[in-house]
Image (cartoon, grey):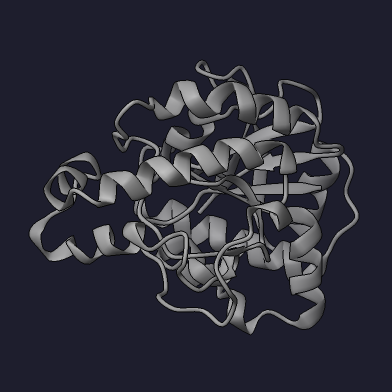
């Protein structure tokens, strides 16, 4: 099973690892693209005002430009430790057991706008780039989409897509029986299911943590649904598929 997570805008500073070595990251077929985009982002950061506009940053976020200026030399740390924010707070990666972190290394990938798909324990620097950022000379969707579609198609086994729609559209998961996009919903007072925004990240983080600590052996969507119920999650097949990607959907009840 492969869990696909979105990144987070917020990240921890520092790290005990050396500068990022793109050759050791997961999905090595993306290495050349990573080099090209890192260079473009670092060049953009040399013009502070242009970078602030391109990254859609406010006055209190100017330090993010310095992060990008130093991405080639900044220290690194594992991806699931680097990212913070609602989903990653619920995942709480630093408190995972050693067995869970080892399992994460084999089963979790985070979709970075800068690096593409990275493994959970891949060492990366702090940076700022979103799926809708504007990098001079590069349109991120056109840049990443064919590469990520091809990379994801190479993944074997069940793919559970927990990304936000913006990142899922940047590189759709393959349309096949053992691939599904998870949408978090709640049941309103009228009995209708509605998609959530903020709390969907909490639910996805808690779900991912449960998978990592339980390490279930599942090979199909049906087996995942059965496991989820035993773990206390209400997960069901939704009607239809994501109209933008064609990938079948699951609904996780918050």
Q: Quadrant of residue 33?
A: top right
Q: Position of residue 235 (x, y in %)?
A: 66, 46
In the picture shown, does residue 134 fall above or below 205? above
Residue at the (69%, 54%) spot, across then down: 25
In the rendered structure, the answer to whether residue 41 lies left or right of residue 83 reads left
In the rendered structure, the answer to whether residue 229 lies left or right of residue 182 reads right
Residue at the (83%, 64%) spot, across then down: 215
Q: Quadrant of residue 199?
A: bottom left
Q: Is residue 56 visible?
A: yes
| In-front residue for pair 214/30 | 30
Question: Could you tell me how many numbered marks the image carries?
Answer: 0
In the rendered structure, the answer to whether residue 117 lies left or right of residue 86 reads right
Q: Position of residue 95 (x, y in %)?
A: 62, 83
| In-front residue for pair 253/212 | 212
Q: Position of residue 70 (x, y in %)?
A: 37, 63
Q: Is residue 248 visible?
A: no
In the rendered structure, the answer to whether residue 106 lies left or right of residue 174 reads right
Residue at the (50%, 17%) spot, across then down: 244
Residue at the (27%, 51%) spot, across then down: 45
Q: Position of residue 231 (x, y in %)?
A: 74, 63
């Amino acid at each position: 099973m492969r869990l696909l997570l979105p990144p987070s805008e917020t990240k921890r500073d520092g790290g005990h690892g050396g500068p990022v070595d793109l050759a050791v990251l997961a999905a090595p077929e993306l290495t050349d693209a990573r080099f090209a985009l890192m260079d473009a982002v670092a060049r953009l950061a040399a013009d502070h005002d242009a970078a602030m506009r391109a990254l859609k940053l406010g006055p209190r976020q100017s330090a993010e430009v310095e992060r990008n200026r130093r991405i080639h030399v900044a220290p690194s740390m594992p991806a699931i430790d680097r990212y913070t924010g609602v989903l990653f707070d619920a995942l709480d990666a630093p408190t995972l057991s050693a067995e869970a972190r080892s399992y994460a290394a084999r089963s979790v990938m985070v979709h970075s706008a800068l690096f593409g798909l990275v493994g959970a324990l891949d060492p990366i620097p702090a940076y700022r780039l979103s799926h809708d950022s504007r990098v001079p000379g590069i349109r991120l969707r056109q840049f990443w989409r064919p590469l990520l579609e091809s990379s994801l198609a190479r993944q074997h086994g069940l793919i559970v897509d927990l990304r936000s729609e913006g990142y899922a559209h940047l590189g759709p998961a393959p349309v096949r029986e053992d691939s599904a996009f998870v949408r978090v919903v709640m049941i309103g007072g009228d009995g209708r299911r509605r998609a959530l925004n903020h709390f969907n990240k909490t639910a996805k983080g808690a779900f991912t943590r449960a998978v990592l600590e339980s390490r279930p052996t599942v090979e199909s969507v049906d087996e995942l649904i059965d496991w989820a119920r035993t773990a206390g999650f209400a997960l069901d097949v939704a009607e239809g598929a994501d109209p933008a990607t064609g990938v079948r959907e699951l609904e996780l009840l918050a």
